């Protein structure tokens, strides 16, 4: 009998510590699969766009468009999530990835590829508010930090294994096959989400026009400013094209080494995600958010002067750790500052506003790079991060 009790006790303990409810497991598992496949090639996208004929200036504009596409749909996706439920808004857009990445892998035209990714990012934007909402509503309030930590762990593990997978396969099968692999994995992931996710909010009969009427209190207004700053920092660093370009042009790394660099950095995201929920729970999301906004870009400044993969790896590890801490804190704070009936809509509003403003960060960064040199986007990220941390000072402690 003890053989069966011990695993059960261990599972119950893990479930209690990390909020491992059914929805958390389904969301995290499918997210891991999709993120792993996407990041086997996604971090090398600026170099592939170059290969297909895009200039650096066009790449900067492309990343602005990609950031906008992931942002503009979130306010509508949030209202639809509150009206039609979280499950549908998470599961149904997943199926669109199959057709979009199928075409994206087939084309040899960088504009067509960019168009496919823009539409795919728009589909992701419709999902994003419901991701945050369903996780927050699937666990007790005091377990939201650990639950978002599990979600972050899934994404971070994909961030580690995806580039590693890409570094092993890209020279053998090429960029196109990796894109097609992302298309194929989306179908079973969509089916699993549709079948296994449990709805956490009752369907509302209130029309979308009513759902999209917002009233932000004092804390939410200050947090919106800080969130905009964090997203700009992310678009100038780990989400943007500048780390890959700097690694190739200034440090001299090849595609395989760049993927390995991101793999190494992603390991710290995995570690923080396992412990980060508890960190947020103990230190409070506000402090963790402020630290992440400043230390994320600060840790990249000395990396600019490294001249090899291994010399810069410890600094990139710190960068990814602070990136993950800021994102876990962001979701936790936003969930705590919203109510169930308007949560998805408010999350969607934040996603759209922060995303639209931050979408201009890659274009700004490329302008600064061309005018002032390779390091300019990273120094700009540091200044923005400091400003974002200061904007959170007036927010009440959770």
Image: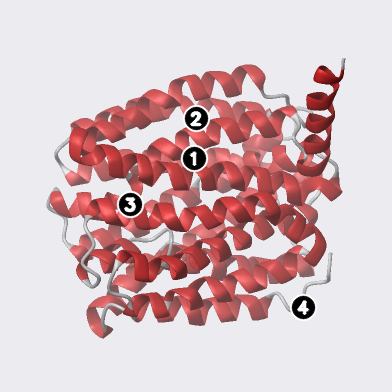
> Considering only order in the chain, which callout, 4 or 3, is on the residue closer to the N terminus?
3
Residue found 39% across the figure and 55% down from its top: 262
Position of 180 with respect to 203 (left or right) is: left
Q: Is residue 345 visible?
A: no
Q: Secondary structure at mark 4?
A: loop
Q: Dot 2: within a 10 Å radius of its alpha carbon, few (fewer than 14), some, or many (20 or more) residues?
A: some
| Residue lying furthest front | 2
Residue found 34% across the figure and 57% down from its top: 63
For discs 3 and 1, the disc positioned in front in the rendered view: 3
Q: Nearer the viewer, residue 153 or 342?
A: 153
Q: Which quarter of the rendered picture does the N terminus lie within?
A: top right
Q: Identify the disc placed on residue 394.
A: 4
Q: Residue 377 occupies which quadrant of the picture?
A: bottom left
Q: CA distance from mark 3 to mark 1?
A: 23 Å
Query: Are the residues at dot 3 and dot 1 in contact (C-beta closer than 8 Å)?
Result: no
Q: Which quarter of the rendered picture does the C terminus lie within?
A: bottom right
Q: CA distance from mark 3 to mark 4?
A: 40 Å
For discs 3 and 4, the disc positioned in front in the rendered view: 3
Q: Dot 3: within a 10 Å radius of its alpha carbon, few (fewer than 14), some, or many (20 or more) residues?
A: many
Q: Dot 1: within a 10 Å radius of its alpha carbon, few (fewer than 14), some, or many (20 or more) residues?
A: many
Please name the residue that numbered disc 3 is placed on.
259
Position of 380 with respect to 52 (left or right) is: right
Residue found 34% across the figure and 46% down from its top: 42
Q: Residue 86 occupies which quadrant of the picture?
A: top right
Number of on-image labels: 4
28 shown above or below 375: above
136 shown above or below 188: below
Please name the residue that numbered disc 1 is placed on.
124
Please name the residue that numbered disc 2 is placed on.
93
Query: Are the residues at dot 2 and dot 1 in contact (C-beta closer than 8 Å)?
Result: yes
Q: CA distance from mark 2 to mark 1?
A: 7 Å
Q: Nearer the viewer, residue 243 or 391?
A: 243
């Amino acid at each position: 009998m003890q053989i069966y009790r011990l695993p059960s006790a261990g599972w119950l303990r893990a479930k209690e510590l990390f909020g491992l409810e059914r929805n958390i497991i389904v969301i995290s598992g499918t997210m891991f699969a999709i993120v792993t496949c996407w990041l086997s090639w996604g971090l090398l996208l600026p170099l592939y766009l170059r290969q297909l004929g895009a200039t650096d200036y066009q790449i900067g504009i492309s990343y602005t468009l990609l950031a906008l596409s992931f942002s503009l749909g979130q306010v509508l996706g949030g209202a639809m999530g509150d009206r039609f439920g979280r499950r549908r808004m998470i599961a149904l857009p997943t199926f669109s990835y199959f057709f979009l990445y199928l075409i994206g892998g087939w084309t040899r035209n960088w504009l067509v590829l960019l168009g496919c990714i823009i539409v795919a990012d728009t589909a992701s934007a419709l999902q994003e508010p419901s991701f945050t909402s369903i996780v927050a509503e699937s666990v007790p309030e005091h377990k939201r930090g650990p639950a978002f930590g599990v979600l972050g762990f899934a994404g971070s593990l994909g961030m580690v294994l995806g580039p590693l997978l890409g570094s092993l396969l890209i020279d053998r099968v090429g960029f196109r096959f990796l894109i097609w692999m992302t298309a194929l994995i989306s179908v079973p992931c969509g089916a699993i989400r549709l079948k296994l996710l449990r709805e956490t909010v009752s369907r509302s009969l209130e029309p979308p026009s009513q759902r999209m009427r917002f009233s932000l209190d004092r804390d939410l207004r200050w947090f919106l400013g800080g969130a905009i700053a964090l997203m700009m920092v992310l678009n100038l660093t780990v989400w943007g094209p500048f780390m890959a370009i700097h690694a190739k042009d200034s440090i001299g790394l090849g595609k395989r080494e760049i993927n390995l660099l991101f793999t190494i950095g992603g390991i710290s995201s995995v570690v923080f995600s396992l412990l980060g929920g508890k960190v947020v729970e103990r230190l409070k999301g506000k402090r963790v958010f402020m630290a992440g906004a400043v230390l994320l870009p600060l840790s990249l400044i000395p990396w600019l002067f490294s001249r090899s993969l291994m010399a810069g790896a410890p600094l990139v590890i710190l960068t990814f750790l602070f990136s993950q801490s800021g994102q876990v804190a962001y979701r936790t704070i936003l969930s705590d500052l919203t109510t169930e009936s308007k949560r998805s809509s408010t999350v969607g509003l934040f996603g759209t506003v922060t995303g639209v403003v931050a979408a201009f960060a890659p274009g700004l960064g490329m302008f600064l790079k061309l005018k002032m040199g390779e390091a300019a986007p990273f120094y700009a990220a540091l200044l923005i991060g400091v400003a974002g941390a200061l904007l959170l000072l007036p927010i009440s402690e959770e």
